[in-house]
Image (cartoon, rainbow, N blue to C red):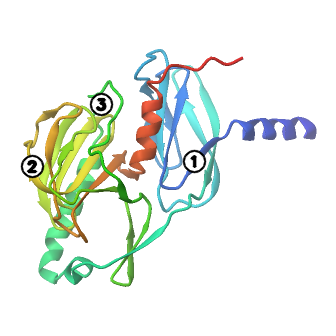
Amino acid sequence: MRSFLLFLSLTLSLFAIEAFNGKTSLITLESPSGYIETGDKNISVLMHPVDHSQGIALIPIDYDASFAEENITWVTPAFSRVMPLHISMAAYPSETLSVDPSKVTPPPEAMERIEQERAQAKAIYGHFTPIRYWDKPFILPIESVTTSAYGSARIYNGTLKSYHGGVDFRALAPTPVLAANDGIVVLAQERYYSGGTIIIDHGEGLYTCYFHLSRFDVPLGAHISRGQEIGLTGASGRITGPHLHFGIMIYGVQADPLDLIAQINALFEPAKETL
């Protein structure tokens, strides 16, 4: 009996889902049925964008998560399946930035606005639209080099304030920003920290974010197509120089946008034959 339990434990560990703090684990399932039960939420199983007989689940891991060995459960009307989840720590860099002191320690008169904007964003990201607007791979919003990676610890004027919740692209001159995929504009607004901001809802809990814009070219509620110009880069908000901040939110959790896009786009690649 002891030998059997050891064998079972080793077998499950071989098939554990590998996850990292701040990343999203995309898993493929045999059918688009049911939901994934995690420790704090239930995550819908979604239809595979190419093979509709299969399902996918996007499991975001919070940036502040710790090393852990957990079990998640795939629940369907026909069965429940326990799947091990192994969370490791990703290696993120740190950055030292110099910005306007008012952006690090806002004046009292700005606090009400900041809290209102935070509550507004939380409500947007917490909404699950039960349809998918996209059916093609995602694209990057701008062709440029990255100047700041996702997950970097942000030290503003000598004080650790946050981590970088997206990726920055260099844009010294106003440059057209393209929608990463089809969706609906759910926010187009000038904000205290992120400056000119557009948020696009792509359905099923997935949002893309475009910060520090100098111009909006799409109105609130507009249906957007992949590659459509939505605005121009700029230097608005808490910023050290002109660039585009691009982010992704999945089920209200910040995700590494380049990592998640790569995983989603891999679903569209032809299956590789194996011996």
Residue 216, labelled with which disc? 2
Mark 2 lies on a secondary structure that is strand
Left or right, 191 with reference to 21: left
Q: Earlier in the sequence, mark 3 or mark 2?
A: 3
Question: Which badge, 1 or 2, is on the more N-terminal residue?
Answer: 1
Alpha carbon separation for disc pair 1 and 3: 25 Å
> Residue 91 location in percent, x, y?
56, 61
Q: Is residue 213 visible?
A: yes
> Of discs 1 and 3, which sits in the foreground?
1
Amino acid bearing label 2: Phe
Mark 3: give few (<14), some (14-19) or many (20+) Cα within 10 Å.
few
Q: Left or right of 225: which side holds 19?
A: right
Q: Secondary structure at mark 3?
A: loop
Which one is earlier in the sequence, the residue at label 1 or at label 3? 1
**Image coordinates for residue 75, horizontal then vertical, percent:** 54, 30
Instruction: Determine which residue is flagged by label 3.
Output: 130
Q: Give x and y (percent) for residue 43.
A: 44, 38
Q: Is residue 44 visible?
A: no
Three-letter residue code for mark 1: Ala
Which residue corresponds to the image point at 35% horizontal and 50% vertical from the top-left?
Answer: 252
Q: Position of residue 35 (x, y in %)?
A: 47, 32
| x 43%, y 16%: residue | 52
> Circle 1 is placed at which residue position?
19
The residue shown at (74%, 38%) is: 14
